[in-house]
Each structure stands twice: as C-alpha cells, then as structure tokens.
Image (cartoon, rainbow, N blue to C red):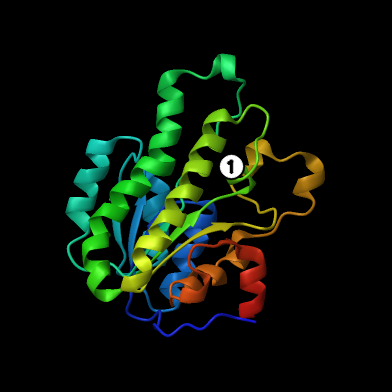
Amino acid sequence: MQAKSSVPIEGQTIIVTGAAQGLGAAVARHLHDQGAKLILMDRNEARLAEVRLRCPGAVAAVVDLSDSIATQHAIDQVVTGPVDTVVHNAAILRVEPLEDVSLVSFQATMNVGIQAGFQLTKAVWPIMQDRGGAMIFVSSRSGIEGFDSETAYCASKHALEGFSKCLAMEGEAHGILSVTVTPGMYMRTPMSETTYPPELREKWVDPIELAPAFSYLATRPMELSGQRLSAWELSKEQV
C-alpha cells in the first residue's frame, strides 16, 4: 500500500547534489520533466553543464562538496529562497584497504557524504520548519553493512542513516519528511563501472528507472518518514 502524499512536484524548488552524472543526473532530468525548479550541485563542470542544458532554467553550482567553505559559499550563492526538497546524492567511493586510506581521503569521503548533507540541511531547515519539506539522502547497502576495503564509504553511509532518522523525528511536527533511499537494483553509473564485477554488470539498469521514487518522495508521503527505502521498488509502484 502506498503512503499518502499531498504536495505537488510542479513548481517545487529542489536541490540535487552529485547531479552531473549517474543517478543524480537521471533524477535531475526526471524532476525537471515533472515541473520542478532545480538547483544542481557537482564538481564536474563540463558534465554539470550538459545536465543543465537538458534542464532549462536550472541553476548550477560547480562546487567540491568535500570543502566546507566552498560548500557554504555555493549554498549562499544559489539558495536564495525557500527550498522544498533536497536530494543529497553526492558521494565518494574509493575501494582501498585500510592501510592505504589516507586521512585526507577519509575526510573527503566523510565530508561529501555527511558534512555536506549537514550543511545543506542547516541551510534549508529554518524555512522548512514553517513550510514543510523533504530531505532525501541516497544511501546503499554500505549504510547498514560493512564491505571489504570500503571503510570510509561505509562510515559515511552509516552516518547518513543515523542523521536522517534524527531529522525525521525533529521534522515530524513541521511536516518535514526525511528518508534514506538505497538504489535497490544494480545500476550503471560511473561509480558502478569501477566496482561492479561482470556478473552484476549483466543485471544493471539505467538509473532513470529509479528516478520516479524521488519525485514521489518529494510529494512528502509523511508515513514513510524515518524509513530506509528502495528506489527500485518504490519506482515500480509509481508506474
């Protein structure tokens, strides 16, 4: 049974991080087609420009989300009014054993995954407390399990899971939905092209097939707040 939702996607202002490629780009295109006004963030200037061209009217910020000062500057520049929904999709995955993980690398992964999510939340939370909103954090199995040679990535996703649960509790009285979303299906992205073995590549799908889950969650089905959801399963329910 689907949860109830009542906030139209058309006309919403939505931030999408990691929007230059993969799932983020697919979600951005889908939300634009649904009538949302987009604020796109990514460090890949060329690919972000391509997504922006596909989404006329979108605002783009080229920013390294691992840099807290640069992140705050970008937020100050592009978040000039109320934001209805945040899709925090940006992440860093480096597959390397612990002995090869540098402090700089570990911090960058944590900063993109959880620190940037915190900064974005702090920026939009005061107005969302008056208007309601949706915070959608992209997670993965690494948010509830451990994987060999993924210490930093797993740590960042575990942190995101806890952060979202707390936001759901604090936001409930204000009509703010907070969820984590795992793909729920193998998908072809620049990240998976570096980590998936051949047997999983045979199963992967285009990330656009997972995008309907995000537009649905942006309509704020509050009964789902605090949960960890499968984008694949939720998208199939929207078809």
In depth, the one of 1 and 18 nearer the eye is 1
Q: Is residue 43 above or below residue 80?
A: above
> What's the residue type where badge 1 is placed?
Met
- Toward which corner of the image does residue 59 lie, by quadrant? bottom left
Residue 201 point in image, percent of width and height: 75, 47
* Label 1: element kind: loop
Q: Quadrant of the C terminus?
A: bottom right
The residue carrying pointer 1 sits among few (fewer than 14), some (14 to 19) or many (20 or more) residues within 10 Å by Cα, namely some
Q: x, y (%) of residue 71?
A: 27, 43
Q: Which residue is mark 1?
A: 191
Residue shown at 46%/75% (left/top)?
222
Instruction: Return the residue found at the far right.
Output: 199
* Residue 9 drawn at (x, y percent): 40, 79
For the point 47% across and 48% down, the residue is 162
For the question of whether residue 119 can be seen, the reply is yes
Q: Quadrant of the N terminus?
A: bottom right
Residue occupying the point 30% across, 69% down:
57
Residue 19 in view here: no
Answer left or right for 179 relative to 40.
right
How many numbered marks appear? Answer: 1
x, y (%) of residue 177?
42, 68
Q: Quadrant of residue 81?
A: bottom left
Horizontal side, residue 103 vs residue 79: left or right: right
Q: Nearer the viewer, residue 117 or 172?
A: 172
Task: Residue at the far top: name it.
Answer: 99
